[in-house]
Amino acid sequence: MKIDLNCDLGESFGMYKLGDDDNIMPYISSANIACGFHAGDPQIMVKTVRLAIKFGVAVGAHPGYPDLQGFGRRAMQLTADEIESIVLYQIAALQGIAKAEGTQLRHVKPHGSLYNLASIDRTCANAIARAVAKFDDNLVLVALAGSELIKAGEEYGLRVANEGFPDRAYLPDGNLKSRNQPGSVLHDPNLVAENAVRLANDGIRVQSKSSNEWLKVDTLCLHGDNPESVENANLVRQRLMAAGFEVSGL
């Protein structure tokens, strides 16, 4: 049994540090690296790519809205063409750095509000999938399990990875609970690790009035800006391996 363990990293900016990338990287198998729009800058991108190479972690682009102040978690009214362009721009920027450092991109995962919109809005999802396919149709598109972005990626001929979140609370319909609501982010490492094993084994439960469905999960995400991120990553990897899973990159 294999499962990917990914984390959103490279989200510092200039003199401002966010997250503990150095201590998280040894525990994960894929790194989603910010590309300078919602977080990160060229030097941080280089540093994070080098760190991923050091620990044998797969490098992926983490494009978001051009929203440094809001960390890419605020909604923006962009056209489909604009979304396609900003995603393409950010992928290309990180691929340039990755190539210069002797590696290549493995995957693309949108960030924050862009990710959330693409999960439910097919126009946005198509724009992102189209950008990825135009750039390199060998890249894996990472998206919320069962979402519109997964469907769009498949339609554009991309390999997709259905994502689950051990450190986030879910709604009965399979969507993530809004960060504006209490209890949306989980901080107890034991609970996060327990969720990780459950998601890897069973997937995500989607309830409706008429049926229950379980969505397969290919990759698990831990948020690098969570104060317990290092402890979460360590314990999640331990528990997954104890449950018989091989933690392996996309």
Image: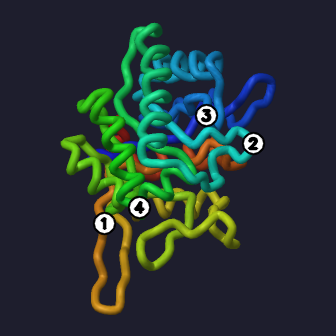
Three-letter amino acid code of the residue under disc 2: Gln
Q: Which residue appears farthest toward the right when viewing the image?
A: 15
Question: Percent position (x, y) of residue 217?
Answer: 33, 57
Badge 3 or badge 4: first in the primary sequence: 3
Secondary structure beneath dot 2 equals loop
Q: Which residue is mark 3?
A: 37
Q: For the residues marked 2 and 1, what is the alpha-carbon distance in whole angstroms?
A: 34 Å
Secondary structure beneath dot 3 equals loop
Q: For the residues marked 3 and 1, what is the alpha-carbon distance in whole angstroms?
A: 31 Å
- Whether the residues at callouts 2 and 3 have beta carbons within 8 Å, the answer is no
Residue displayed at 55% across by 20% down:
51
Three-letter amino acid code of the residue under disc 4: Asp
Residue displayed at 34% across by 64% down:
203
Badge 3 or badge 1: first in the primary sequence: 3
Q: Residues within 10 Å of mark 4 (few under 14, many from 20)?
A: some
Secondary structure beneath dot 4 equals loop
Three-letter amino acid code of the residue under disc 3: Phe
Disc assigned to residue 69: 2
| Quadrant housing the C terminus | top left
Q: Is residue 147 above or below residue 111?
A: below
Q: Is residue 23 above or below residue 3?
A: above
Q: Residues within 10 Å of mark 3 (few under 14, many from 20)?
A: many
Badge 2 or badge 4: first in the primary sequence: 2
Q: Which residue is mark 1?
A: 215
Question: Percent position (x, y) of residue 206?
Answer: 36, 76
Three-letter amino acid code of the residue under disc 1: Leu
